[in-house]
Amino acid sequence: MSELRTLAIRVLPQPGESLDSWLEALARRSWTSLSALLDALGLPEVPARERTSRLITSLPEKALRRLEQQVTLPACRLDDAVMPSEIFGQRAPGWRFCPQCLHDDAGRWPTLWWLPWAFACTKHHALLHRVCPSCGREPRYFLPRAVHLHPPGHCMRRTGRRRVCGADLSSATQLSLGHSHPIVQTQTEINSIGLHPFTSADAVFAEADCLLAALAESLRPSDLQKMSNACRSAWEAAFTDATKSKSPLGSWRFHERRTRILTPEFLQREYTEGGKSLATLAREAGVPIAHVVRHAKNLGVAVHRGGVRPPAFNDDWLREQYLTHKRTGRDIAEEVGTHREAVRRRLEQLGVQRRPSGRSIPALMTKLDTSIPPDIRAVVEETLHGWRRLRRFQISIYFPTLASSANYLDLRPGTLTMQLDQLECAVGAELFRRSVRHAPQSPTRRGVRLLHDLDRDGVRKLMHDALGSRIEEIPDQDAISAAIGAADGERGALTNLHSRSQHGARPFIPLPMLPLLRHLLTHRDQESYAAQIHATTGIPMTTIFKQLKRLEEAGWLVSRLETADERQGSRRRRTYYALTPSARQAVGQHIRTRYRSSHLGQ
């Protein structure tokens, strides 16, 4: 039988230090990764993406005793470095840190920082941080690996396959509170609760809940007002994490509270006889409604569906409201003071046939005046979101493509296409022609008429009343110009500069062609050839030849082949290019305009 292997290099754990922190210091002292150290110590293999909390909550007692023998520590020396897993339940424990403590203790992490009710540092009278200020995530959520390659007290959260954040956690802003602050005093009392691997979770919860409840009652508004915004936010997040219903402590607190308050006599008096809903009782007791319903059923209390006693309906009134006045079940339930489901069940008992889904919505029952154009009435009447489709059609026509329209409306192109297809289906005609290369989308004759109808004063008022604050704004000229430029892009139609061509004062130049044109304008007093342009600008040769060909076809360049006298020998003759006079003027004006725009924007 082989003897137990021991380590030649040893590091003693500090008082109150967590097991993961001590093993990290031991790995750094041995100049090896933490995973390699765990393998050498014979601990259960921890996968690469395993949570760090496993080291302090899931190791069996035999593993701790064997680890103490391997590093020649006294028996039970590591009991203070681990905690019972029942304190955390199914959720991985959250970890907080004090920047000043990390600086003073050379990056060693106390066990107390893992506790769900750890929110303040009693040594420096400051609140603890939850996340790394650089990457914004918990720095020790996953097991750190190559700790020997990074200084202690730095964030080891992975940001890539072979990279970690590496931020210095000790340089984070100190969330100071003051020595006499109630939060610091309560944290001092909570830290005195004894913890070891075999501590009863119920006993710990009882002490922690007593102290947290006393703190919540004693904390005055003036105490919170003295705190900075960062401190107040950190405190609210820490208190919520410790006491919310899904945490083990919060679940235990709610269980104790409902057992103490929601007795059978109380439920009989307030719910069965008093007519209060279970939701109201849950809100008054500060217990989630699901806990109250489950507790009432366990006590044998008859719980009505929806947690509300069925009201005594006036059947004739109910029929009149639903059938004659076309009111919804929600409206009737709110007036009676019950749940919508109770109204639905009573209507079924009376044999009243329910309207088809959605037919109670006011928008589906809207009838417009005959003075409104028929296309608009066909889109809006007895449909949902008709006005929204009309507004989006009105906006889309300003843009060259549906993709640019969807980008302005913050929609997926497929969503906008579907809505416009529904609009054309309701009208029964094609409203616009889709965009093709170098040809923007444009309205048809029917679409032009619909756009003209949408500009009427009465129609505009109806649209604003229907959409309210959710109405999208008509784009301004800057948004339209930017969309046109983005739609043209690299394959945009270069303006022809032939003498027979008609063009405006500002011809369009695709942005990718500017470096080549800028070079030709700079060397306008001499001819240029492709190799020279490549050596000066760095543009790939293939791109240069394509752009030169496009410019020459559009009338921006003149070219000539090098003569035999100029190019003696058997070498291939060059082709020289130069800008035409009109191209020089257009490029110079375009560059000056871009220069002024960039400086005015600064």
Image (spheres, grey):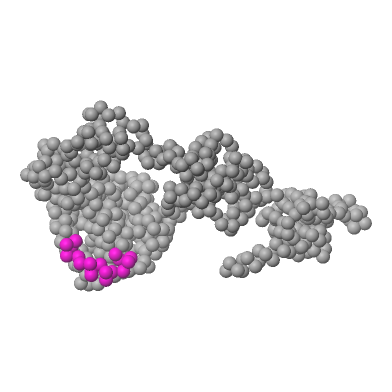
Measured as percent of width and height from the top left, residue 103 is found at 33, 68
Could you tell me if residue 147 is visible in this image?
no
> How many numbered callouts?
0
Q: Is residue 90 above or below residue 317?
A: below
Q: In front: 18, or 463?
A: 463
Q: In front: 24, or 431?
A: 431
Outermost top residue: 351
Q: Is residue 349 above or below residue 70?
A: above
Q: In front: 299, or 451?
A: 451
Q: Main secondary structure of the magenta part?
A: helix
**Residue at image location 25% in from the left, 58% down from the top:** 239
The boundaries of the magenta stretch are 215-232
Query: Is residue 228 covered in magenta?
Result: yes
| Left/right of residue 299 with respect to residue 119 in the rendered view | left
**Residue at image location 63% in from the left, 53% down from the top:** 485
Q: Is residue 338 above or below residue 587?
A: above
Q: Where, quadrant-wise, is the C terminus in this rendering?
A: bottom right
**Residue at image location 29% in from the left, 58% down from the top:** 237
**Residue at image location 80% in from the left, 63% down from the top:** 524
Could you tell me if residue 579 is visible in this image?
yes
Measured as percent of width and height from the top left, residue 236 is found at 27, 60
Q: Where, quadrant-wise, is the N terminus in this rendering?
A: top left
Measured as percent of width and height from the top left, residue 442 is found at 62, 44
Outermost bottom residue: 179
| Left/right of residue 353 with respect to residue 389 in the rendered view | left
Query: Is residue 325 covered in magenta?
Result: no
